[in-house]
Image (spheres, rainbow, N blue to C red):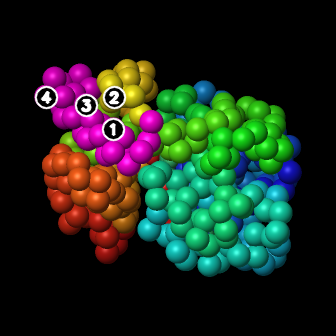
Amino acid sequence: MRIAIVGAGGVGGFFGALLARGGANVTFVARGAHLAAMRRDGLRVEGGAHPVHIQDVRATDDPAEVGATDLVMLCVKLWGVEEALEQIRPLVGPDTTVVSFQNGVLKDGYLMAAFGAERVIGGVGYVATHIARPGVIAQTGSLQRLVFGEFDGRTSARVAAFHEACAAGGINAEVSTDIRREIWQKFVFLTGLSATTATTRLPIGPVRENPQTRAFLLDLMREVVMVGRASGVALPEDYAGECLKLVDEVAYDMTSSLFHDLDRGRPLEVRWLSGGVAELGRKAGVATPLNRAVADILALHADGRAEG
Ligand SMILES: NC(=O)C1=CN([C@@H]2O[C@H](COP(=O)(O)OP(=O)(O)OC[C@H]3O[C@@H](n4cnc5c(N)ncnc54)[C@H](OP(=O)(O)O)[C@@H]3O)[C@@H](O)[C@H]2O)C=CC1
Ligand SMILES: CC(C)(CO)C(=O)C(=O)O
């Protein structure tokens, strides 16, 4: 299977390395020092249970060199989507499938607008990773999981083929018949985790142990569930409670991609995460004071530091 990974960072670098290890024909679309290091030294994943080193990495900053592929995985930050979508047009032919493993619930709309709904399948990625240094992805904990599927829930040959490629690389991959709900479930978990770790500047361990920050986390997630339900997503009413159990299972020192970006002075995705909850809540008539407060507090950092 010919797979183009657009954005070879925490998510794209990690899952792309596993797909390449499993035998898929993977090309990374990358840039800057990270691209140079991958070309020179290959791509490494460190810190998790199973370190990976792919020596011969196909990587480019010019999608036209690659041409149409079977599947494109979009893994850039949400603030970089517009630029990336323009740039990757040469990767998308009549038979190409496009999937985003970005966070949030608005991402697939961007893909459908750019390439047509028929080319897009839905996806969510669970992993705690970041670029430690050029050419190297650092993983915290052992969580790694991809869930994907057709938006109409049917089983399809393209989803089955991607599932096979993931399994060959050792990815915990699942096909969903209700991918929209999966995307929202991840949104509940992620906005809780990212909002609390970024505002406290601490990993999830201490946040979930302290009764006050634990209640804050639960209430943040409850707001997202209410917005999802009001938007027609079949989330169980007590889904935030279920999510809290998931939060209790992740590594004590796990943070979030938002935390890493804040820590490094990079632009934040908060507009699409807690800010997205507040915006969707406003449209659906659901009050979201906690998510709004998180978005307002982090607004001063949303564009990153000049040197970040
Ligand atoms: N990291 C995590 O643990 C998880 C993240 N996510 C989500 O996945 C998405 C990606 O996050 P993450 O992997 O952390 O992001 P990273 O910043 O680690 O990686 C993105 C990479 O893509 C590169 N990039 C951006 N635009 C382009 C472009 N036009 N051409 C070539 N390369 C480009 C970036 O380069 P540069 O640095 O130069 O901008 C960077 O190397 C986000 O939506 C995030 O919320 C989901 C699950 C887990
Ligand atoms: C919460 C986590 C680490 C889980 O995948 C994530 O998606 C993120 O931080 O972006």
Whether residues under marks 2 and 1 lie with C-beta atoms below 8 angstroms apart, the answer is yes
Distance from disc 2 to disc 3, alpha carbons, whole Å, reads: 13 Å
User: In the rendered image of this protein, does residue 104 appear above or below residue 179?
Assistant: below
Whether residues under marks 2 and 3 lie with C-beta atoms below 8 angstroms apart, the answer is no
Q: Quadrant of residue 248?
A: top left
Distance from disc 4 to disc 3, alpha carbons, whole Å, reads: 10 Å
Kindly state the secondary structure of the residue where label 1 is placed.
helix
Q: Amino acid at mark 1?
A: Val
Distance from disc 4 to disc 1, alpha carbons, whole Å, reads: 20 Å
Q: Label 3 belongs to which residue?
A: 218
Q: Label 4 belongs to which residue?
A: 212
Q: Label 2 belongs to which residue?
A: 237
Q: Earlier in the sequence, mark 4 or mark 3?
A: 4
Kindly state the secondary structure of the residue where label 3 is placed.
helix
How crowded is the residue under tag 3: few (<14 C-alpha within 10 Å), some, or many (20+)? Answer: many
Q: Amino acid at mark 2?
A: Glu
Q: Position of residue 53 (x, y in %)?
A: 72, 43
Name the foreground residue: 231 vs 67. Answer: 231
